[in-house]
């Protein structure tokens, strides 16, 4: 790459970052449904036609923001896993759950973008899937390590659910028993349910000591997936 090409690439990256930052500000102020490329361009002192060279549509800008949010959440989960690498599997699982909660509380509008109400008229493309999967893969990896190492506790599975659990295991974690795969899916849903209830106000006048309550709930999730 020539010096001129490098300078142009840096300039494009800086403008792209500025567009995203302004878009996040608008998400916080107005919500995702009201995100407008024209409004972003106006706040940045750009003409709309110039912004369209970076993001041809509102949906492409939303997709970029969604991928960034999923990646940031995934990075927080991975850091928590790596920091607790010497801890017991249940403690590692709980640490990741707590990292998810902390990230959500620190980035409420970005969390709402990926786990809140769907944006009218927007359908996330498949390009968001790898980033969206990062946190789940961290949790699967912890359970996989336990299964291959100290072992998992005995998990029960109703006969009627076994075909579905076997399908989930084949699709998501073929090296885990169906019982563990089904338990992981349930724990994943419960984790984000806990976080969403806290973030969106459903715990108001119900749970006061939310950090302690969440830690207890995350510990129970670790037990539910068979971690000792």
Image (cartoon, rainbow, N blue to C red):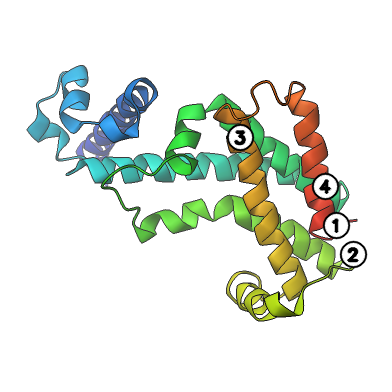
Instruction: Give SS at disc 1.
Output: loop
In space, the residues marked 1 and 2 are separated at their CA atoms by: 6 Å
Whole-number angstrom distance, CA of label 3 to CA of label 2: 29 Å
Q: CA distance from mark 4 to mark 1?
A: 10 Å
Closest to the camera, between mark 3 and mark 4, is: 3
For this rendering, which residue is in front, 22 or 152? 152
Residue under label 3:
197
Q: Which residue in the structure is indicated by mark 2? A: 153
Tags 3 and 2 in contact by the CB under 8 Å rule? no
Are the two marked residues, 1 and 3, in contact with CB atoms closer than 8 angstroms? Answer: no
Determine whether the residue tagged by mark 4 lies in a helix, strand or loop: helix
Q: Quick one: 115 or 206, which is closer to the camera?
A: 206
Per the rendering, the mark at residue 55 is none
Q: Is residue 127 left or right of residue 12?
A: right
Q: Which residue is mark 4?
A: 220
> How many other residues sit within 10 Å of disc 1, few (<14), some (14-19) or many (≥20)?
many
- Which residue does the image show at 67% across and 74% down from the upper left? 165
The span from disc 1 to disc 3 (Cα, nearest Å) is 25 Å
Q: Mark 3 against mark 2, which lies toward the viewer?
A: 3
Disc on the earlier residue, 1 or 2: 2
Position of residue 50 measured from the top left corner of the image (x, y, whole percent): 11, 33
């Amino acid at each position: 790459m020539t010096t001129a090409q490098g300078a142009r690439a840096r300039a494009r990256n800086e403008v792209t970052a500025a567009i995203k930052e302004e878009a996040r500000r608008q998400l916080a102020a107005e919500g995702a449904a009201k995100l407008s490329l024209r409004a972003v361009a106006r706040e940045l002192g750009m003409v709309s036609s110039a912004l369209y060279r970076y993001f041809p549509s509102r949906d492409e800008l939303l997709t970029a923001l969604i991928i960034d949010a999923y990646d940031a959440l995934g990075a927080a989960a991975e850091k928590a896993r790596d920091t607790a690498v010497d801890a017991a599997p249940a403690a590692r699982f709980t640490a990741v759950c707590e990292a998810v909660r902390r990230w959500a509380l620190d980035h409420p509008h970005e969390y709402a973008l990926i786990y809140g109400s769907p944006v009218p008229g927007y359908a996330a493309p498949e390009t968001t899937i790898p980033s969206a999967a990062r946190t789940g893969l961290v949790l699967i990896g912890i359970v996989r390590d336990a299964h291959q190492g100290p072992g998992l506790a005995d998990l029960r599975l109703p006969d009627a659910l076994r075909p579905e659990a076997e399908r989930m295991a084949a699709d998501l974690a073929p090296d885990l028993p169906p019982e563990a795969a089904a338990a992981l899916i349930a724990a994943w849903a419960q984790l984000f349910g806990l976080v969403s209830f806290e973030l969106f106000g459903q715990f108001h006048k119900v749970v006061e000591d939310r950090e302690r309550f969440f830690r207890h709930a995350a510990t129970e999730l670790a037990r539910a997936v068979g971690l000792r």
